[in-house]
Image (cartoon, rainbow, N blue to C red):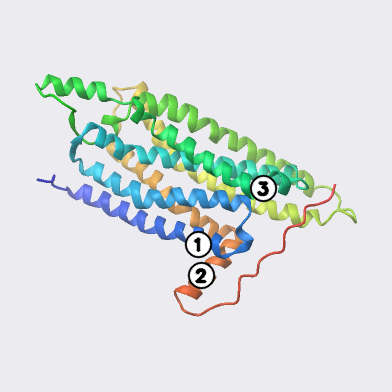
Amino acid sequence: MPPAISAFQAAYIGIEVLIALVSVPGNVLVIWAVKVNQALRDATFCFIVSLAVADVAVGALVIPLAILINIGPRTYFHTCLMVACPVLILTQSSILALLAIAVDRYLRVKIPLRYKTVVTPRRAVVAIAGCWILSFVVGLTPLFGWNRLGEAQRAWAANGSGGEPVIKCEFEKVISMEYMVYFNFFVWVLPPLLLMVLIYLEVFYLIRRQLGKKVSASSGDPQKYYGKELKIAKSLALILFLFALSWLPLHILNCITLFCPSCRKPSILMYIAIFLTHGNSAMNPIVYAFRIQKFRVTFLKIWNDHFRCQPTPPVDEDPPEEAPHD
């Protein structure tokens, strides 16, 4: 017989479903926009698509699994472990996509003349594939043995039972806090976030320095080029800020769980932290729509063409931006 759902759980499920209903269509729209608008085909937007794919998976896969875990069914240990791992994979994929975006924007302002020969479509695809492979390795590490199976087996044996332990499926019952803090947070979340902050600080410094230079006759309009770069960099830095704001509270709570086992954590704080992590997947399309004109125009075109049945003229694709001459 399935466990009864309390009013609090019903509210939790309702909020999670609402987040999923915003996240999935919003990020599908991002992928669709890149597909239909040739002007959104450079490396940065390829990495944005990778980020959007991870966010679609959060809404379509992770949130349903989180609801299942919240209800707390009794399952075999490894079944519960497989339910818990997708969020680790997708979080890592998002972090690595954000890092790739930051490096890409740095190269655009650091070596504008050689950028297109260094960052080719093939290399961008290889980078995206590498990010996903690494994300699977990091996210599936608990399945390779770094988990709480030993504790579950001892508790199971103490009850006089044999075979694989059957547990109430909860994230903290299968995922080791040592893994979450020492490996996931201290190695694969915090250092990339700090590196991205340094990269964006350098990007803003380089852009401001270029904008401060006097324009020469043969400069290839650097004011326009670096002005566009500044606007896009600000938008992408905002995406990074929202990601950090959404994920750091949960990781801080994990640190408290590990380093202060006797400390009491109000359950409402844990729920807020979980909502923030899932809600982050719904934020990015909103930022793109309000902050990046190419996305905004393409979103409106898709809406008019496919939902209002009022075809609009083709998207005005910007000519390739001319890199400034030295």
Marks 3 and 2: which is nearer the front?
3
Q: Nearer the viewer, mark 3 or mark 1?
A: 3
Q: Is residue 166 above or below residue 113?
A: above
Tell me how far mark 1 sits from mark 2, CA to CA: 8 Å
Q: Nearer the viewer, residue 175 or 215?
A: 175
Tell me, yes or no, whether the two marked residues, 1 and 2, touch with CB atoms within 8 Å. yes
Label 3 – label 1 distance at C-alpha? 22 Å
The one of 140 and 5 positioned closer to us in this rendering: 140
Q: Which quarter of the figure is the N terminus placed in?
A: top left
> For residue 302, which numbered disc appears in the image?
2
Name the residue rendered at 61%, 73% in the picture: 314
Secondary element under disc 2, as helix, strand or loop, is helix
- Callout 1, which amino acid? Trp
Q: Residue furthest right?
A: 217
Identify the element where label 3 is drawn.
loop
Residue at the disc numbered 1: 32
Give, as a three-letter code, the residue at label 2: Ile
Say the numbered circle drawn on residue 120. Answer: 3
Residue 96 place in picture, x, y as percent: 52, 39
Q: Look at label 3 and name its amino acid.
A: Thr
